[in-house]
Image: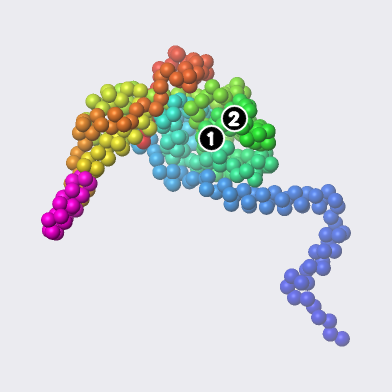
Amino acid sequence: MITKVPEGDDFLKPCNHQLDRDTETPKVKANLNHLRMDIAFEKEFMKSFSSNVVPPNDIGVNFDDIGALQNVKDELKELVTIPFKRPELSCKRKLTEVCKGILLYGPPGTGKTILAKAVAMEAGAYFINFSMSSIPPKWFGEADKYVKAVFSLASKKAPCVIFVDEVDRLLGQRRENLKGQQATQATLEIKNAFMKHWGLLLKKEKDCVLVLAVTNRPFDLEETVIGQFSHRLLVGLPDVQSRAQILRVILKYKDLDGVACMADGYSGSDLKNLCIKASLRPIMELYEKDKSERDAALAEGKFPPAPYVSSDVRALNMQDFSYSFEEVCSSVSSESVGMTELQQWIERYGEGGSRKRTRDSCFM
């Protein structure tokens, strides 16, 4: 009599099925199901979130790319760069352990986001972008699991910076939402989950993970959220010396003090737009000259002249900037309601309030 023996996995399948029936209690089955669901969730999470994770060498900006803001850069070096790169130097004293929460705040366009990226690169840290807009709607029903996965990923990638852009949208005071109660409830669940897992991070003293948030509206944050940030650094509008430094970084010119004096009240973003507008003027002049000469030659039945090249573009002059100032104005008004609220918030929550000298601003 010959008995056929199943080959490969076919031989094990009946055994596995019998083992499942004999040993799996309802509790064990439930645990296995939860484990399978967690594995599937983590796989799906990594697939959808991977674009928000940037290795330090791919960030592409450092402190040298930022004009001015030396005081803030020095503070961030003390708070982030040194503890992340040399944790053994900071761990012996509790007061100098790794910082878990920093808020960069100030008017729009002053360079807060680029500064956050630069400090991550300087510290050799992964950069995780987290904001309301980065969360796919399908995850709104699983806020706690999603946020937990973000913080877990940050711990695995440590040293790591969790960057929260427009933190007032994520952790701001609850307000009526134009899209309805469902959207408001989803936002609240994400906020509560973020605060919960951030609180757990604060207890992990040796984890090199930092929540670095930026906002133009710090006055929209709740007291409990403000208290989580151990350091709150103002990134304000640049003074004349800082504006000159920013212009030199943008244009690589040395003598721009006159333009800096004329740009009172301009943010770093405004200065960049000003330089773009001024730089376009010589290009447009050469383009119109090239077109005019070409049309004239063709009208006379002649061969058109060789087109001009980039080396033919003339250097910038003050007339270009005078034209640019007529087209590009300051985007921030010192008399606006937002600036008034910001100043009041600085007095109450800023590091040192009115006792601390206002820091210069920056921009790439």
Q: Are marks 2 and 1 in contact (CB under 8 Å)?
A: yes
Q: In front here: 322 or 10?
A: 322
Given residues 222 and 187, the one toward you in this image is: 187
Tell me if I can see residue 77 in this picture.
no
Amino acid type at mark 1: Val
Q: Position of residue 77 (x, y in %)?
A: 43, 31
Residue found at x 27% / y 35%: 278
Look at the numbered disc 2 and give the secondary structure of its residue: helix
User: What's the amino acid at mark 2?
Assistant: Leu
Residue 45 rendering spot, x and y as whole percentages = 62, 48
| Residue in the image at 54% along x and 22% along y | 219
Residue at the spot of label 2:
171
Quarter of the image where the N terminus is located: bottom right
Q: Looking at the image, is mark 2 or mark 1 earlier in the sequence?
A: 1
**Residue at 62% over, 43% down:** 137
- Residue 222 in view (yes/no): yes
Mark 2 vs mark 1, CA separation in Å: 10 Å
- In the rendered image, the residue lying farthest to the top is 355
The quarter of the displayed image where residue 269 is located: top left
Residue 97 x/y as whole percent:
53, 29
Q: Is residue 344 above or below residue 278?
A: above
Residue 283 painted magenta = no
Residue lying at the far front in this picture: please name it: 299
State the residue position of label 1: 164
Q: Which residues are magenta?
A: 286-307
